[in-house]
Each structure stands twice: as C-alpha cells, then as structure tokens.
Amino acid sequence: MSNENIRKPSAAENLMQLMSFTADKALEMADAGSVLGEKTEIDGMTIIPVSKISAGFAGGGANIVNATVKKSNTPAGSGAKVTVTPLSFIVIKDGELRIVSVDASKNDTKSGIIAKVLEQVKSLAGKK
C-alpha cells in the first residue's frame, strides 16, 4: 500500500480534535463531585464542602505552506483552566443543618479562610 492512499486529516480536523480533547479533559476536572465535596465526619458532625466551578478553554492553529518543499505544516495548540472556589460548608449536627459561608470577596489566604470556617464549625459543635 502506498502512502498516496492514506488521507491526512485537514488542519481544521486536527484543530477540532485537539479542541475536543481539551474540552473533554476540562469537563473531567470540573465534575459534579467538585461542587459538593466528600463529606467528613468529626465529633458527631457531618461537614460537606460546597464550591463554585469555573472552567474555560481556548485553542487555535494555522496552516503554513512551504512552497519550496511543497509541504504543509499545521501547528495547533489549546489549553484549559478549571478553578474551584469554596463557597460554604454544610454542617449537620443532631439532625440540624447549618450552612457556614466563606466570604470569598475578601482577599484572605486559603489558610485564613480555613481558620475562620473551623472557628465557626467549633462554635456550632459547642451548641446543643
């Protein structure tokens, strides 16, 4: 079989395959399990994190023809970003459900946010 019978994908097909692959991977990272995280049980309390997911992707390519060697080159690239932002925690204790909010509008560090949430959860643990 000669190489002449093998059909090469076009630049547009290559780009679409690359973009589709990137989008699929971004969706895998941003699954529903990221919105409602795994529950944790501490001292008779169940704590479930609730987050916001943001995802985006982009890509592009070109069709470059080198006339002297009569070859075509189709460079392409794509990228994705997935961001998980904590919004609140659902705290269940003694049949009561409470929501502890995270104030993401302040420029707190992650450790500062965790410390504030733990303080609120401790205060809930002390209440009967």
Image (cartoon, rainbow, N blue to C red):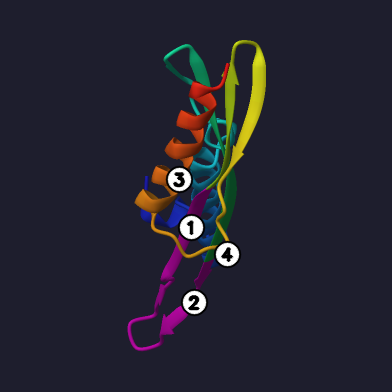
The amino acid sitting under disc 3 is Lys
Q: Are marks 1 and 2 in contact (CB under 8 Å)?
A: no
61 or 105: nearer the eye?
A: 105
Q: Residues within 10 Å of mark 1 (few under 14, many from 20)?
A: some
Separation of disc 3 and disc 4 at Cα? 50 Å
Please name which of the two marks, 1 or 3, marks the residue nearer to the observer.
Answer: 3
Where residue 2 appears, as percent x and y from the top left, is 37, 51
4 or 14: nearer the eye?
A: 14
**Mark number for residue 12?**
4
The amino acid sitting under disc 1 is Ala
Q: Is residue 33 above or below residue 2?
A: above
Where residue 38 appears, as percent x and y from the top left, is 48, 24
Say which element carries label 2: loop
**Mark number for residue 63?**
2
Q: Are marks 4 and 2 in contact (CB under 8 Å)?
A: no
Which residue corresponds to mark 1? 80
Please name which of the two marks, 4 or 1, marks the residue nearer to the observer.
Answer: 1
The amino acid sitting under disc 2 is Asn
Where residue 60 appears, as percent x and y from the top left, is 52, 70
Q: Residues within 10 Å of mark 3 (few under 14, many from 20)?
A: some
Q: Are marks 4 and 1 in contact (CB under 8 Å)?
A: no
Q: Is residue 67 above or below residue 28?
A: below
Say which element carries label 1: strand
Say which element carries label 4: helix
Q: Earlier in the sequence, mark 1 or mark 3?
A: 1
